[in-house]
Image (spheres, rainbow, N blue to C red):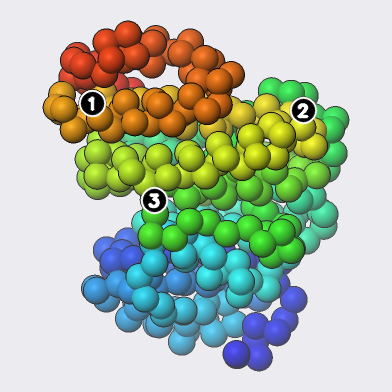
Amino acid sequence: MNNDFQKQKILTFSVAAYNVESTLGETLDSLITDPEVMDRMEVIIVNDGSKDKTAEIAKRYEDDYPGTFRLVNKENGGHGSTLNTSISLAHGKYWKMLDGDDWVETENLPSFIRFLEETDADLILTPYEKVWVDRSELVNSHSLSNGKVLDVSSVQEDQLLRLFAHEMAIRTSLLQDNGISMTEHCFYVDTELVYYSLYHTKTVAALDLPIYRYRLGVTGQSASIQGRLRHWEDAQRVEKRLLEHYYGNNECTNCALAVRKSLYDIIFSFGIYQYQNFALMEDTAEARERASSFDSYLKQFPKFYRELGSSKLVKLERILRFHMLSCFRNTVSTIVKT
């Protein structure tokens, strides 16, 4: 390994890169800032078996900034495998995910690095920006005291709800020491990352400084309608893994209330997500069997099953026994696009 990487790093960026030659330059350019700040960062670009010029582009940054950028080439294993690889290699005090088609607020990096250097919280939350072609939206939904490290037992029960990977920087030792790993060859693993990181979190801090810029409205993204229809099995795979962890650990009663409520909210919201996916499918016998099979699986978690039924969509799908799914498609499509 390059000796420059032996220096103390404060933040590791994990850049997932698969066939992103059209956007990777913008992503990596956003990480170029003051040399002193870059010395405190490491950027691990995990090339996940790309077939385009992704590796060639990443290698240029590694050559130009050998103390910051590091290219790791591997066979294709999916998004989860890129996260697992970077976690195992990370030297930074904190670790943060960055997809190869997103970017960061460059001007905020110096202040962010200084804050991470001074704090000791397990989890750091920062605002992020959703960016479409024609508009953007700043998301800052957690009303925690700015810059203050809090024990999660002192956090109000609704203050950690609806966490997203884009707003998180996680203490690297929390990830490594607890053996946190994401499912490979699978989409939606950012949901796993949030869930498992939060499960092990004891302290949290929020910094009112936007860092992540999340690109939306791209055809084929897992969050798009096309992506959801293509990867519905992956979504179920992740939901089942999290459900079995939650109930296999006595509904996570060992966690602080705010954490426990957030973990439940993750599996509940992602449960609704599955039924939305059914509504996006063509109304066929195969689609009805998919929906019915998942619905039957959930019955082993009776309380969860009943509470999901409070959703109008879930209730109607069950009443209709998953016939006429297409009746809900327009409503769900509107939700997905917003």
Q: Secondary structure at mark 3?
A: loop
Residue assigned mark 1? 288
Which residue lies at the image location 54% right of the left edge and 65% below the top edge? 84
- Using the image, determine if residue 288 lies above or below residue 110: above
Q: Nearer the viewer, residue 11 or 189?
A: 189
- Using the image, determine if residue 220 lies above or below residue 132: below
Which residue lies at the image location 39% right of the left edge and 54% below the top edge? 186
Q: Can you tell which quarter of the image residue 318 is in?
A: top left
Structural crowding at the residue carrying mark 2, measured as other residues with C-alpha within 10 Å and reported as few (<14), some (14–19) or many (≥20):
some
Q: Nearer the viewer, residue 72 or 278?
A: 278
- Is label 1 in contact with label 2 (beta carbons under 8 Å)? no
Residue assigned mark 3? 187
Question: Viewed as shown, does residue 325 lie left or right of 71?
Answer: left
What's the amino acid at mark 1? Arg
Residue 269 percent across, percent down from the top left: 49, 27
Mark whose residue sits in front, 1 or 2: 1
Please report whichever mark, 2 or 3, sits nearer to the chain's N-terminal start.
3
What's the amino acid at mark 2? Leu
Give how far apart the Cα atoms at labels 1 and 2 are: 37 Å
Please report whichever mark, 1 or 2, sits nearer to the chain's N-terminal start.
2
Q: Quadrant of the N terminus?
A: bottom right
Which residue lies at the image location 81% right of the left edge and 53% below the top edge? 119
What's the amino acid at mark 3? Phe
Structural crowding at the residue carrying mark 3, measured as other residues with C-alpha within 10 Å and reported as few (<14), some (14–19) or many (≥20):
many
Residue 312 percent across, percent down from the top left: 39, 9
Q: Secondary structure at mark 1?
A: helix
Q: Can you tell which quarter of the image residue 273 is in?
A: top left
Q: Quadrant of the C terminus?
A: top left
Give how far apart the Cα atoms at labels 3 and 1 are: 23 Å
Residue assigned mark 2? 257
Structural crowding at the residue carrying mark 1, measured as other residues with C-alpha within 10 Å and reported as few (<14), some (14–19) or many (≥20):
many
Give how far apart the Cα atoms at labels 2 and 3 are: 29 Å
